[in-house]
Image (cartoon, rainbow, N blue to C red):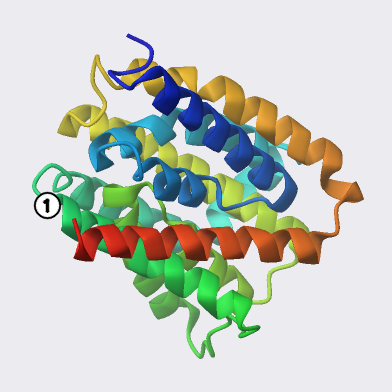
Amino acid sequence: MVSGGLSPAAFLAAVAVTLFAGFVKGALGFAMPLIMISAFSAFMAPPLALAALILPTVTTNIHQAFRQGWREAWGSVRAYRRLIGTIVVFIVISAQFVAAIPQPVMLGLLGVPVCLFAGVQLLGRSLALPLRHRKPAEYGLGIVGGLYGGISGVWGPPVLIYLVSVGAGKAETVRVQGVTFLIGAVVLLGAHLRSGVLNAATLPVSAALVVPAAFGMWLGFRLQDRLDPVRFRRWTLVLLLLTGLNLIRRAVFP
């Protein structure tokens, strides 16, 4: 029941991926669902891969969002309410279409943005956009993040792009990501309970992966100060690029 029909080897692979993704999140503050959905799609059907990452994402983001206290978290909600609100609305909208999207299309929709996100950063290009007006940027990036979030569980790249573009500091960036990811993950949880992606068969898998996610995040926090962040982030991006290319390969040659 806990494995959701996965073979023992596939379930252990999911645990290992989640442990690593939690570690990356603890060390860097992002990329957990990106790593999980990219790797899971190699040995799970996309709807199961999406369901499996939801509860680990919710629980780890609770800690990230409130690590500096509830006042700071609430301040982030107020300051970025347009971005967060738009993401929430479009997660709910796009989540209803997961079951109707053919598997090759979904794999392509996952692989292309993963490759673009990782490739741009590996080339040393800045993600910052020349923003003349913050409101249109918040709504635009919120729509993109919400549409991808509903079908893949990943809406971090547009949020990160916006934070880089407005010059948010390190602590604020990590906190805002945590708050945004938490609110979006809770909405995603509700949306996919409604869509049927999360059900009696998939919920136990997602719940079981909370443990390796939490342990990996704890390890990431403990080792954060000892790591060479530049080198570690670079290898993480290389891994994301490779997994994104593999998703595109599977979309083109199913």
Q: Mark 1 is on which residue type?
A: Pro
Could you tell me if residue 86 is visible in this image? no
Q: Quadrant of the N terminus?
A: top left
Image point 21% across, 66% down: which residue?
Answer: 252
For the residue labelled by badge 1, is the local secondary structure a helix, a strand or a loop? loop
The residue tagged 1 is: 102
Q: Nearer the viewer, residue 245 or 208?
A: 245
Which residue is the extreme one toward the left? 100
Q: Nearer the viewer, residue 167 or 221?
A: 221
Report crowding for label 1: few under 14, some 14 to 19, many 20 or more residues within 10 A (C-alpha): few
Height in image: 196 above or below 134? above
Residue 117 x %, y % = 49, 71
Judged left or right of residue 166, residue 87 is left
Name the quadrant containing residue 167: bottom right
Q: Quadrant of the C terminus?
A: bottom left
Judged left or right of residue 170, residue 157 is left
Residue 7 x %, y % = 35, 20
Which residue is the extreme one toward the top? 1
Residue 246 x %, y % = 38, 59
Q: How many marks?
A: 1
Q: Nearer the viewer, residue 45 or 135?
A: 45
Height in image: 71 above or below 167? above
Image point 12% across, 52% down: which residue?
Answer: 101
Image point 40% across, 40% down: which residue?
Answer: 40
Judged left or right of residue 161, residue 6 is left
Height in image: 6 above or below 177? above
Name the quadrant containing residue 191: top left
Could you tell me if residue 21 is visible in this image? yes
Name the quadrant containing residue 48: top left
Residue 175 x %, y % = 67, 50
Image point 42% across, 62% down: which residue?
Answer: 244
